[in-house]
Image (cartoon, helix red, strand yellow):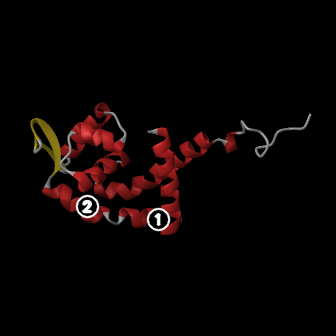
Amino acid sequence: MPENTPATDPLALESQICFALSVASRGVIAAYRPVLEPLQLTHPQYLVMLALWQHAPLSLKELAALLHMEPATLSPLTKRLEALGYLERNQHPDDGRGLALSLTTEGRALREQAEQVPVEMMNRLQMDEKDLHELHRLMTMLIERVHP
């Protein structure tokens, strides 16, 4: 009986998309760590800030939908960002009964520093803009398929 190789074995670890995504995700997030440290942000906090820089003000529920995360997971992240002085909770402009997360002056100013993060990450990942756009296109397609 011939021995299976990664090229012929449908269950070879190296052939599994779940394995490749898991390893790549951990590696990319680890590469972000030293880039985000000067901003006093963890990777999940950076994602929150990206959403707020683009869409603020947002309710916790709106933020959770944008990030495909649970509000219970986001609540401690937003509290930490509030403690850092980057965001505040105010009355939602569209719903006087609800609260919305808004950027503080310091949080808005942080955006200017953060504009260097994508450039630094391209260098660290040794990928050019074309490669990253193609990878992003494929990942977005995958996200759309797993979150219909």
Is 136 placed left or right of 88 in the picture? right
* Quadrant, the N terminus: top right
Q: Pick whichever of labels 1 and 2 is earlier in the sequence.
A: 2
Q: Is residue 130 above or below residue 77?
A: below
Between 104 and 62, the one nearer to me in the picture: 62
Residue 107: which quarter of the image? bottom left
Is 116 placed left or right of 85 in the picture? right
Helix, strand or loop at label 1? It is helix
Q: Is residue 128 visible?
A: no
Q: Residue at x 34, y 48 (%)?
A: 42
Q: Which residue is mark 2?
A: 111
Counting from the top left corner in percent of width and height, residue 97 is at 9, 34
Q: Residue at x 35, y 55 (%)?
A: 36
Counting from the top left corner in percent of width and height, residue 108 is at 19, 58
Categorize mark 1 by other alpha carbons within 10 Å: few (<14), some (14-19), many (20+): some
Between 25 and 80, the one nearer to me in the picture: 25
Q: Which residue is mark 1?
A: 122
Is 52 placed left or right of 97 in the picture? right
Helix, strand or loop at label 2? It is helix
Q: Residue at x 33, y 49 (%)?
A: 47
* Quadrant, the C terminus: top left
For badge 2, the amino acid type reads: Arg
Q: Is residue 38 above or below residue 89?
A: below
User: Whole-Å distance between the Cαs marked 1 and 2?
Assistant: 18 Å
For badge 1, the amino acid type reads: Met
Q: Is residue 32 visible?
A: yes
Between 139 and 123, the one nearer to me in the picture: 139
Counting from the top left corner in percent of width and height, residue 38 is at 31, 58
Counting from the top left corner in percent of width and height, residue 8 is at 79, 42
